[in-house]
Amino acid sequence: QVQLVESGGGLVQAGGSLRLSCVASGATSGRTFSSLVMGWFRQAPEKEREFVAAISGSGTTRAYADSVKGRFIISRDNAKNTLSLQINSLKPEDTAVYYCAASRTLWSMNQKDFDSWGQGTQVTVSS
């Protein structure tokens, strides 16, 4: 199984930016990581976990939730087994625990298809 560890969360004022990172380890190799669809999900207090962004194994295909499109940028570095999420123009409604996840499917944005999850990193946006 792949172990995923997120970092980069924190307390930021509305309008600010953060860059989240996710490092894959354990059974993951560069070849294995590059075969995985990677995604970011978030869970706000009292709400269900929701899709934020996903990126294909090669990094050529990206998808975003409508709520973050134009503000968030997902990227990956397969040589370093890392996934990143650049978050710009933060809004209070972005406050949530952000999770990194991996899927063995060819392409997916469905939580059910992601079988490896990190512990999450807290992003808090003040107004």
Image: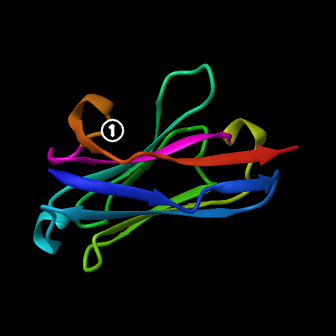
In this orientation, which residue lies closer to the viewer: 127 or 59?
Answer: 127
Decide if residue 11 is on the left or right side of residue 85.
right
Q: Residue furthest bottom?
A: 79
In magenta stretch: residue 101? yes
Question: Front-most of 7 and 31?
Answer: 7
Left or right for 28, reference 122? left
User: In the displayed structure, would residue 80 be above or below residue 76?
Assistant: below
Residue at x-position 57% and y-position 62%: 8
**Colour pattern of the rendering:** rainbow
Where is 56 relative to 107, above or below? below
Q: Which residue is mark 1?
A: 109
**Secondary structure found at label 1:** loop
Q: Is residue 30 magenta?
A: no
Numbered marks: total: 1
Residue at coordinates 29% horizontally, 78% vertically from top-left?
80
108 lies above or below 89 = above
Q: Which quadrant of the structure image shows residue 61?
A: bottom left
Q: For the point 50% across and 22% down, which residue is it?
A: 48
- What span is colored magenta in the figure? 95-107
Tell me residue 5's x, y (percent).
38, 57
Where residue 37 appears, as percent x and y from the top left, is 25, 52
Where is residue 13? Give x, y as percent. 83, 54
Residue 78 vertical placement versus 45 (above, below): below
Relative horizontal placement of residue 105, taking residue 47 as reference (left or right)? left
Residue 72 percent coordinates (x, y):
58, 55
- The quadrant of the rendering that contains the C terminus is top right
Chief secondary structure of the magenta portion: strand
| Mark 1 residue type | Met
